Image (cartoon, rainbow, N blue to C red):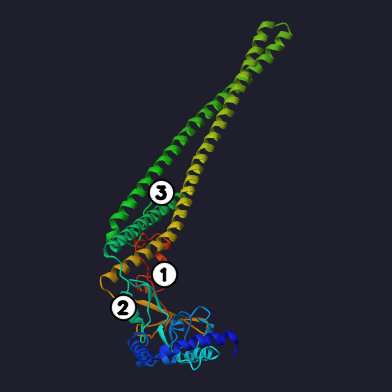
């Protein structure tokens, strides 16, 4: 035996004499503790087969050696720490195997014939989260089931009535607002498409419930008023521009008549001037008279050119008028296309926000149903660590639990409330269905 261990053994040996008197008392106390501690459950026989794991707490009692006795936690590496010995690996050992290992370590130069007793004083706790009233950490008891742990956590979760009803009303109001907005946008899109196609009437039709008749009729009436007013304004502008075309055309015809008359008069004057010029050459006419005829001829030619220029200007005005008419129509169509683009963008946004709003409303309604006493469907999963690996499996209320299990309770949406997506009617002009959720399946869960 090494000198250090001899000194420790001598010191401990001197104390054995005084400790002998306490043997019977300690044995009785140990027996009382073993049978009274709630987690040992010797009658169930679980402590014999249970294997220690990190997080367990064991009570080690070495007869006559208070320094080596006490409550010891199994650390994350699966070891316990004893004075004079150091770390001892107990992970995966039963209580009897742990007791024997401690005995062997003490007998190896520390004590002669040590008397060691080991029991589990506290098993790894259970962790409860999700749809329970008081999520948290709860001590393990032999025979624990999912139902008993949920009961310890206060039962399945219930929302506060006032807050839940208020939240549902707000969620329902948002769904109604978004549905009404989508209904209005669908009617507006139909109106704009009718204007784009040059139609003179606008009368949308859609399947709807009697409760939605008033809102739908009001929306259609407003869009019809817009359709009629914009059509009247466009028609008024076009009529005003087109009304100027007959006037310009008449002016052109009048000027063309004057041009024809001036041409005939000019021909007559030219012929008369030529004949008079011959007489002047023969000495039978006056030169001044011939000059006056030539001046008159020039004046008629000048007037003829003026009339021709005026006709050209009038024809240009007529062309400008056609261009203005076309610009007015193009400008109106551009405005219509911009409005149609904006409406389609808003509808795409609603295709994203409206389904989410319906899901939120469904969750709030499901919470109200739970508060009213309707049994909600729940999914229970248990995460269990074993041999260094964690496994997750579905459980029921009667599933037996082991120390260290993590119980996750989730509330499932009922089939009629789970949103599947927009129905086929919502892809077109179906304003009556924008406020109703489509058929759904339990694909989501609500975890508190």
- Residue 161 higher or lower than 59, as above or below: above
Residue appearing at x 34%, y 64% in the figure = 361
Disc 3 target residue: 200
Residue 197 appears in the rendering: no
The residue that disc 1 covers is: 420
Mark 3 secondary-structure assignment: loop
Where does the C terminus fall, quadrant-wise? bottom left
Local secondary structure at mark 2: helix
Query: Where does the image place residue 320, in percent across and percent down from the top left?
Result: 55, 34
Tell me the distance, in whole angstroms, between the alpha carbons under discs 3 and 2.
Answer: 70 Å
The reply to whether discs 3 and 2 touch (Cβ–Cβ < 8 Å) is no
Q: CA distance from mark 1 to mark 3?
A: 39 Å
Residue 380: in sight, yes or no?
Answer: yes
| Other-residue count near label 3 (Cα within 10 Å), few / some / many at <14 / 14–19 / ≥20 | few
Residue 57 disc label: none
For residue 313, side relative to residue 182 (left or right) = right
Q: Which image quarter: residue 269?
A: top right
Residue nearest the observer in this picture, 407 or 204 = 407
Mark 2 burial class by Cα count in 10 Å: few <14, some 14-19, many 20+: some
User: According to the image, label 2 marks what residue?
Assistant: 151
In the foreground, 380 or 67: 67
């Amino acid at each position: 035996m090494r000198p250090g261990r001899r000194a420790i053994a001598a010191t401990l040996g001197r104390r054995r004499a005084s400790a002998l008197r306490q043997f019977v008392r300690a044995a009785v106390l140990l027996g009382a503790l073993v049978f009274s501690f709630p987690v040992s459950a010797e009658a169930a026989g679980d402590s014999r087969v249970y294997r220690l794991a990190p997080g367990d707490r064991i009570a080690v009692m070495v007869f006559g050696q208070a320094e080596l006795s006490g409550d010891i936690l199994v650390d994350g590496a699966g070891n316990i720490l004893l004075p004079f010995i150091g770390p001892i690996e107990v992970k995966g050992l039963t209580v009897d195997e742990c007791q024997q290992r401690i005995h062997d370590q003490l007998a190896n130069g520390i004590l002669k014939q040590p008397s060691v007793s080991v029991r589990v004083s506290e098993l790894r706790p259970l962790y409860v989260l999700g749809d329970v009233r008081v999520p948290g950490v709860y001590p393990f008891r032999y025979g624990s089931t999912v139902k008993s742990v949920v009961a310890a956590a206060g039962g399945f979760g219930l929302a506060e009535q006032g807050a839940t009803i208020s939240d549902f009303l707000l969620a329902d109001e948002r769904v109604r607002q978004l549905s009404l907005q989508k209904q209005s946008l669908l009617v507006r899109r139909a109106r704009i498409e009718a204007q784009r196609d040059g139609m003179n009437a606008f009368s949308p039709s859609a399947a709807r419930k009697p409760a939605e008749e008033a809102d739908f009729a009001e929306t259609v009436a407003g869009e019809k008023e817009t359709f009629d007013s914009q059509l009247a304004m466009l028609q008024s502008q076009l009529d005003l521009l087109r009304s100027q075309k007959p006037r310009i055309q008449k002016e052109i015809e009048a000027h063309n008549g004057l041009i024809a008359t001036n041409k005939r008069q000019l021909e007559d004057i030219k012929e008369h001037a030529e004949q008079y010029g011959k007489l002047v050459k023969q000495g039978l006419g006056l030169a001044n008279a011939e000059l006056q005829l030539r001046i008159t001829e020039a004046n008629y030619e000048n007037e003829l050119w003026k009339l021709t220029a005026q006709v050209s200007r009038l024809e240009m005005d007529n062309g400008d008028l056609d261009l203005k008419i076309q610009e007015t129509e193009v400008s109106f169509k551009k405005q219509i296309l911009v409005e149609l683009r904006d409406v389609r963008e808003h509808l795409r946004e609603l295709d994203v926000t409206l389904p989410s709003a319906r899901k939120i409303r469904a969750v709030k309604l499901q919470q109200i149903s739970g508060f009213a006493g309707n049994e909600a469907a729940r999914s229970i999963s248990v995460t269990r660590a074993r041999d260094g690996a964690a496994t997750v499996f579905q459980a029921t209320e009667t599933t037996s639990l082991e120390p260290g299990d993590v119980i996750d309770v989730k509330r499932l949406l009922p089939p009629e409330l789970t949103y599947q997506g927009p129905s086929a009617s919502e892809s077109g002009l179906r304003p009556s269905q924008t406020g109703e959720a489509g058929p759904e399946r339990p694909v989501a869960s609500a975890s508190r």
